Image (cartoon, helix red, strand yellow):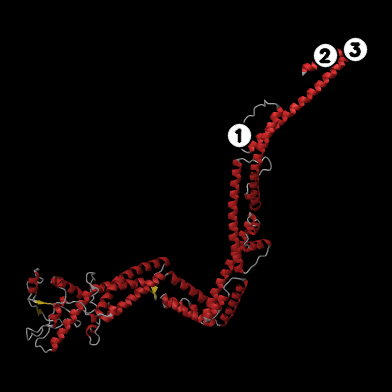
Amino acid sequence: MSKHLISQLRQKFEQLDLLHTDIGTSSQLKDEQNLVLYESILQVVDQHTDRVAQEQESLRRQITTIKKRITSYKQLMGEYTGDTAETKSPLKVALADMQRQEEIILKHYEKRLVNVQELYQQLKHYMNSLEGFVNIELIMEKDIDVSLPAVTVLEEEIRRCENEYMQRTQRVDDGVHKINQMWSLLGQSPNNEQDSILEQLHRETNPNEKLTLYVHVVGESGLRYIAQKMTQLEEMVQQREFRKQEIIQNLERLWERLRVDTQERSQFLQTNAGITMHDMEQYENELKRLMRLREERIGDFIMAAREELTGLWDKLYFSEDERRQFDIAFNDEYTENSLESHENEISRLQLQLEDHKYLFERVERHMKLLEEVKQFEASTNDPSRLFGKGQRDPGRLLREEKFRKRISKEMPKIVQELEGALNEYETSTGKPFCVHGVPYIQTLKQKTSRHSSGSEEAPPSTPKTPNRDIRVPRRPMTSPHTKSPLLRLGFRTPQPSRTRPLEDLEARRQRFRRPMSAQQLSSDDSILHKVREGNIKKRQAQMARRVRDSGSSRSSETLQDENKAPMSSPLKVRKRAKRYRSAVGSPPLLSSDDDTALDLGIFDDGPELSDMSDHEI
């Protein structure tokens, strides 16, 4: 195209020269006109060149701007952006490519931006409710970061706000529930707008409506108000309950003094069971009414208080001097101050009795045991308790043995516990524990020493068991075919018991004859064996009476003690056991002197069923 233009210009300039020649233009004028023409042509070319250059620069600027925007979008989306190479393609083509790429990236960015803006909206919602708890720095107004790390941070913040919101709503629900309960107890109602919201929130069941109400109370200011309201109402409830209990205690004391019917008391308490203002007024009015009655009957109250004081003095084992120390109880003053002094003294003694309850229980138990021992000794000193006609009691000896065993077991234990309690009382109070003015530790030591010395030197308090070594002679048999009643009863005991050595039996008899204070009960001696020995004594006594009544010429031996029963005479045992030994082939069960006299009481088969009562089994 440039060759064609140059050819055309050459032709035009040649034509122009011909025209100047025909015209006859001077060479100077012709040069001047040609110069003007050349400058005009160059100016047009320059203008066109400048316009094209400007277009080029504009295209480059557009391409650079689009590249920057693409890089920014990629950075906001968290994508990699490397160094952009120089564009080698024509600028318009490169610009079109850049525009297409920007459009694609922008769509991706806007898609992510929608999700991020939704997260922003949630944060703004929590920001309105939770106030300063939300991190507002995460919310951006421009150049919003939609990358995955930024979205993760937003989601974590939303979860944190959501957890806090749930915790606060739970706190609000609990607080609102307690506040409404206390309003109900106190008989109060909301008195401002904030209280009305709390009451409405307690009654509302629609979740959407509750969300609207939560906005006003889940903030820090709302939570502070709920906490303050709860504290205020709790203090009011405690004050009213304390006052109510105080009034009830006074009412119960006055009711007892005035002998008010129990049904009337219960009806009043049930009617005014709450702590509303109306209930408290009823309690106050009832207390005032009873106080007026109390003033009218002050003398009766003081006398009743003195009776109660006397009962406490008896329980505390006070002596006469200790009782006289409270001189108000012995004068004729019947005033309010006197009644108050009596009530204070009663409270003090009740507290003292409760504080040392363990000691008083042990003292009472020890006294009871001493009284039981005293009664037992008095009853056992009567020898006719065993042999009197019409008073036969087969289980008496068994009960006496049980009593001795129980006393020997319980008395040392209660004495040990009582000594420890008495020493502890003296250590804590600085004075010994007295019973009717006498230190009980001295009484305890005297009783203990008397019991121990009595068991060694004093005569036994119970009658001796009849001596079993005495043999009561009996009348000889008139016929060898007649068998003695004792012989028929003698061998009903199982045969292995006959092998018991006679020395062991004699030792056991001697131990049984000893009094209880000197005898140590052995667990080997069963109760049934003791009953069996008692039955042996009874049979021997019966045999002795039959011998005496028969008019035998033989006289029985003189008894050593009035409480001892006579013994039966020695009996000759037939040597019938040899037949059994030969049949069985076992070694002899008896010693070589089988023909000697034996005490058949050792073969007793235990107590008769008629001798055992229900309370002895």
Q: Secondary structure at mark 2?
A: helix
Q: Nearer the viewer, residue 26 or 63?
A: 26
Left or right: 420 in relation to 303: left
Q: Earlier in the sequence, mark 3 or mark 1?
A: 3
Residue underneath mark 2: 10
- Of the residues shown, which amino acid type is indicated by label 3? His
Quadrant in which the C terminus appears? bottom left
Between label 3 and label 1, give the one nearer the viewer.
3
From the image, state whether disc 1 or disc 2 is nearer to you. 2
The x and y percentages for residue 312 are 44, 76
Q: Let me know if residue 433 appears in the view.
A: no
What amino acid type is highlighted by mark number 2?
Arg
Residue 20: mark: 3
Q: Residue at x 65, y 37 (%)?
A: 105
The spot of residue 259 in percent (x, y) is 52, 82
Q: Earlier in the sequence, mark 1 or mark 2?
A: 2
Residues under numbered marks 3 and 1 in contact, where contact means CB atoms less than 8 Å apart:
no
Indicate which disc residue 80 carries.
1
Name the one closer to the observer, 527 or 136. 136
